[in-house]
Amino acid sequence: MSRNARVERITKETKVLVEIDLDGTGAAEISTGVGFYDHMLHQIARHGGFDLTVRTAGDLEIDAHHTIEDTALALGAAFDQALGDKAGIRRYGSATVPMDEVLVRAAVDLSGRPYVVHDEPALAPYIGPVYATSMTRHIWESFGQAARVTLHVDVLRAARPGGHPDAHHVVEAQFKAVSRALREATAIDPRSAGAIPSTKGAL
């Protein structure tokens, strides 16, 4: 069964196209105009094993907020669409990912109930010229809302001895951990015989 989706989101502030194949190989074509965000979305594809296309044209002359937020909403909607009725999936996934001095844990439930818990230390305000680190929480909230998932992201360790957290490492480890958790949760469970993984019979 094909598990792919195409989502277009057009507002006065942005124009977003997302295409995803949950059973891909990690191939990605990403262009949002925000270099660091492109790098993070490549993590979703590579570490999730999803084929992913993202093309966003946004009002970057104002700032990157609308571009980042609307892309996350479209990405979440694409996941939700590609999962269909969620028959046969594992539903739950978790991953703990180290990246040098940083350790991040992510857990996801493809529950149909949006709820996001996000915990990270105070970081430098920007990574690169336009990616505000305050947007990371907003990405997970926007993605979780549109994908209709429960998502917990916890930075377990971040500080370098005698120094401040490396914002790049903290954010990138989050994307890798969430990607790995999504890979597990969206995988087909060979023991389920195609059943929806809920006693309610629906997700």
Image (cartoon, rainbow, N blue to C red):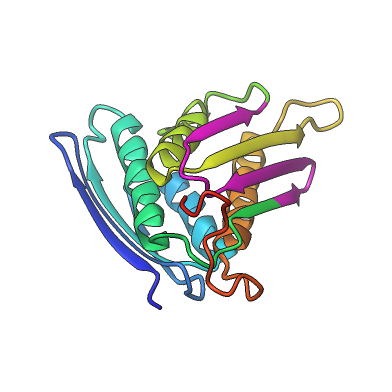
Res 190 → quadrant: bottom right
Q: Image height check: is 48 above or below 151?
A: below
Q: Residue at horizontal 38%, vertical 76%? A: 2
Residue 150 in sight from this viewpoint: yes
Q: Magenta stretch?
A: 95-120
- Given residues 8 and 187, the one toward you in this image is 187
Q: Is 152 placed left or right of 82 in the picture? A: right
Q: Residue at horizontal 54%, vertical 68%? A: 49
Residue 151: % across, % down:
57, 40
Residue 142: % across, % down:
41, 36
Quadrant assignment for the N terminus: bottom left
Q: Image height check: is 7 above or below 143?
A: below
Q: Residue at horizontal 71%, vertical 30%? A: 165
Residue at far left of view: 12
Whether residue 108 appears in magenta in the rendering, the answer is yes
Q: Residue at horizontal 45%, vertical 36%? A: 139
Residue 66: % across, % down:
29, 33
Residue 182: % across, % down:
57, 55
- Given residues 23 and 198, the one toward you in this image is 198
Residue 34 in sight from this viewpoint: no
Q: Image height check: is 153 above or below 94?
A: above
Q: Image height check: is 22 above or below 120?
A: below
- Given residues 69 and 65, the one toward you in this image is 69
Q: Is 118 placed left or right of 196 in the picture? A: right
Res 145 → quadrant: top left
Q: Is 76 placed left or right of 9 in the picture? A: right
Whether residue 102 appears in magenta in the rendering, the answer is yes
Res 46 → quadrant: bottom right
Q: Is 11 placed left or right of 124 in the picture? A: left
- Given residues 187 and 36, the one toward you in this image is 187
Q: Main secondary structure of the magenta part?
A: strand
